[in-house]
Image: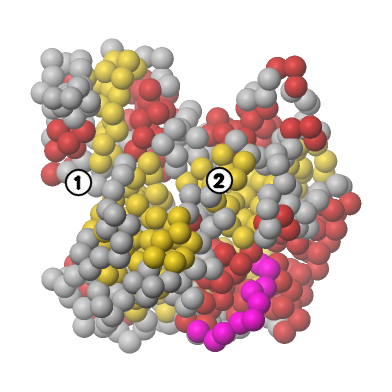
Amino acid sequence: MTARTTTPRLDGLLAGAARRHPERPALAGQGEMWTYAELERAVAALAAELTAAGLHPGQRVGVYAPKTPATVIALYAALRAGAVVAPMDVADPPLRTARMLRNAGISLLLTTERFRTAAREATAGARDAVPEGDRHTAAEREFGHGLAALQVLAPAEQPPTLPAPVDRGGYILFTSGSTGWPKGVLLSHENVAHYALWAAEEFGLTPEDRIGSQAALTFDLTTFDLYSAAAAGACAVLLPDMLRAFPRDVVGWLNEQRITAFMAVPSLYHNLLQQGGIADALPPSLRIAAFGGEAFAPHLLERYLQLLGDRPFYNLYGPTETNACTYHRMPRDWTADQELTIGRGIGGVHIEVLDADGRPTDGEGEIHIAGPTVFQGYLRDGRLTDPTVRVPFRDGVVRRAYASGDLGRITADGRVFLRGRRDFQVKRRGHRIDLLDIESAALDLPQVATAAAVAKDGPHAGQIWVYAQTAATERELLAGLRTALPHRMLPDRIVPVASLPVTVSGKVDRRALADDVPAAADPRVAQAAHTPLNALQENPS
């Protein structure tokens, strides 16, 4: 990676591309195409509107809108105005959105006319956490591109000013939290831009590239789609949300849009191969692809390597707190019977595996990540807390590092191999989910006495089940969870039980629950193991 004296701001990547390639396509979606000059003018104009309306550097702004060119403009404009910006998912339940707003200390929410009602509900929920006498009425203001701004927090409620470098702007992404309150992951411009610039260089992106952007803006994969595209002067092409659930249509879109670079989670690649017919319609324009966020089925990965031939296929790894921090270009001759590595640290990033005593080990330990992509900390109740630790790496240097919670081992040549998790977190379609988050939502239901969420082993491996001590039906419990959890976090099974198994110490025996359906007096348990929950999810009435 070429050395850089300074890392530009994310909006600076756009401004630089507009100077170098003003007439090149920058952004495509919803039947629109924006050149870099047009996109830069729109961003500058909206940023000026936001500043004139009183937005100040370091203020935290949420963007609550579907993935469209207007939403991308809003993200860039808030960054240009010096805000700390948080993309937010309109598919999330209002209660969960309200908790995100409150936890991250977001004071202004940008939305569109279509989602204004839901945005009002979420901002009202965020204000409900304020003592009744201190609540205020949210002011609203109209801006360009069909955007409206809703006030979330009154000036007196503003959270403490964030420290440098995020006092002049940054990025917030959310991860699942064990308490039921999503954690705000605070990233600086440099944290995101360092990765975006590395990826643009490693993948050899040029202004001729068309990057297929399929993930939600709330997912860290899109930092590549938007900001690596800007770094290279390439075009980010937004996949219509409605197509994501139809693999054959996604394959058609990749071909029609002449996508040259594509990054996605393995579950999407699985679907494109098994249901989308990509083996018979591999886009001829595709020259590079990458995956990350979860495990790739080995036999399907081997098949992709055969299909792609000489085209590079990268395995990327990294929690939201660090962006992608390791990479491995898959060898063409890799086969499913070989162990899969997540590779080595990207340029400037250091990876270490530490044992239980916090010392580097050649055996299995916890993966620690240090370097310019490591986040600033978590936002909880509007305040920043930094969970990183200073630890010695095997080269003798003590570094500020993020303890990932992932177990692994590292070889003498720096390659890292994953070995699972040390906590209650799992990956589903690339999203990190804390099982205690789901459990907390179940415990909040008035019908539930106690509950446990587990990742199943055996014939149901990969599924998330909730066992609930309750007299309610699975359908009733699912309806309740829908109001608290986004669809991506809904369990595969909700099993009503008379009681939960416990260990000799009196704790819930999660191992027994994960291994198989426990014996219980409730006859519904045996039936639940054979009843697909997706039927209930698709027909909730």
Q: Which residue is mark 1?
A: 461
Q: Which residue is mark 2?
A: 385
The residue sitting at 25% across, 21% down in the picture is 496
Q: Secondary structure at mark 2?
A: strand
- 135 versus 90 height, above or below: above
Q: Would residue 243 be counted in the magenta stretch?
A: no
Identify residue type, mark 2. Thr
Q: Nearer the viewer, residue 429 or 280?
A: 429
The residue sitting at 34% across, 17% down in the picture is 448
Identify residue type, mark 1. Ala
Q: Nearer the viewer, residue 433 or 532?
A: 433
Q: Position of residue 449 (x, y in %)?
A: 32, 15
The magenta segment is 1-10
Q: Is residue 153 visible?
A: yes
The residue sitting at 68% across, 68% down in the picture is 9
For the rendered model, the colour scheme is secondary structure
**In the image as oriented, which residue stretches furthest toward the left?**
519
Mark 2 burial class by Cα count in 10 Å: few <14, some 14-19, many 20+: few
Q: Is residue 236 visible?
A: no
Mark 1 burial class by Cα count in 10 Å: few <14, some 14-19, many 20+: few
Quadrant assignment, res 539: top left
The residue sitting at 44% across, 33% down in the picture is 179
Q: CA distance from mark 1 to mark 2?
A: 35 Å
Q: Earlier in the sequence, mark 1 or mark 2?
A: 2
Picture quarter with the C terminus: top left
Q: Secondary structure at mark 1?
A: loop
In this rendering, position of residue 292 left or right of residue 532: right
Please, what is the dominant secondary structure of the magenta stretch? Answer: loop
Which disc is residue 446 wearing?
none
